Amino acid sequence: MALDLTNVRARLVHSAKHAQSVRDEVRAWGERNPYSIIQKVNSDCTRYAITLRVNEPPPLYQWSLMIADCIHSLRCSLDYLVYAIACHEAFPKPPSHEGKLQFPITGSREHFDDAATCRKQLGSISDPVRAAIERFQPYNRPHPELPPLLSILQGFSNWEKHKLLRLALESFAQGEVGMDFSHVNPRISDGDYEFIPPSSPEIEDGAEVGAMTFKRPTPNMRFDKTDIFVVVAIRHSKRDPAGPVGSDLSDFSGLLNSLSVEVREIIYGVSDIVV
């Protein structure tokens, strides 16, 4: 009898549907020109700033709920996988420790052994399957830029049980800002000015998203490049707790895609071991 992954696949489809719904809503919001760029200058013309005006506040609470549904289904698909394998290996009898079965997500071998053996989260699943599940644990799957993806998924799953997932607007994920100095006399050299990036990647209405400062008064200047892109980001744990500001924010769409790819790889990698 072949391993039945019908319920697992249903959860994956459900997760993908929610993720696409959020992407569609965010794209529609972006197409309505929901924000504009305002240029400001101080009284002595030594500092020119760009601020962002939010014309249409994004419904972050609504999107957070939709993303939580996506995360929940991804997490459930892993639990469904363990249950499906336990049923398959125990057939025709019910699986042992049926009420405790789930896909453990742990940060160390010691915690994995405790979850699998002491807390019976894997029931009596065979050793090859258990070993395959352990290979995908966060402590065996580092990520070059983010915390291990499975630990992010677990963190989101635990967080959304009690609070909304933390979404934010993030600027300068891409973009270009600049001024034309060709008409200024005397000529401005590289050491005469400095570009000041935003103090925080998370922005709100009226936030400064960049500034240019000059060592001497420089009137009649304007930014000739203000291509600033705003993305909807989701906050997560940092790969390095002492990492730079903003390293705990990721574009929600790209991160959801990475989590989905990771979960699918786990499901098909583990299920291939089942005989």
Image (tube, rainbow, N blue to C red):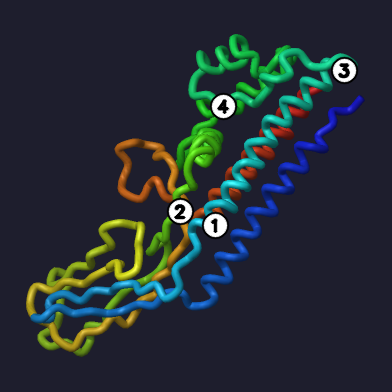
- Name which residue type carries label 2: Leu
Residues packed near mark 1 inside 10 Å, few (<14), some (14 to 19) or many (20 plus): many
- Give the spatial CA distance, label 2 vs label 1: 8 Å
Whether residue 267 is situated above or below residue 188 in the rendered picture: above
- Name which residue type carries label 3: Phe
- Give the spatial CA distance, label 4 vs label 1: 26 Å
Q: Nearer the viewer, mark 4 or mark 1?
A: 1
Whether residue 3 is situated above or below residue 221 in the rendered picture: above
Q: Quadrant of the C terminus?
A: top right
**Residue topped by disc 2:** 167
- Name which residue type carries label 4: Ile
Q: Secondary structure at mark 2?
A: strand
Q: Say if mark 2 contacts mark 1, CB within 8 Å.
A: yes
- Give the spatial CA distance, label 4 vs label 2: 24 Å
Q: Secondary structure at mark 3?
A: loop
Q: Nearer the viewer, mark 1 or mark 3?
A: 1
**Residue topped by disc 1:** 63
For marks 4 and 3, the one nearer the N-term is 3
**Residue topped by disc 3:** 91
In the image, which disc is placed on residue 45?
none
Q: Secondary structure at mark 4?
A: loop
> What residue is at 73 percent from the left and 42 percent from the top?
11
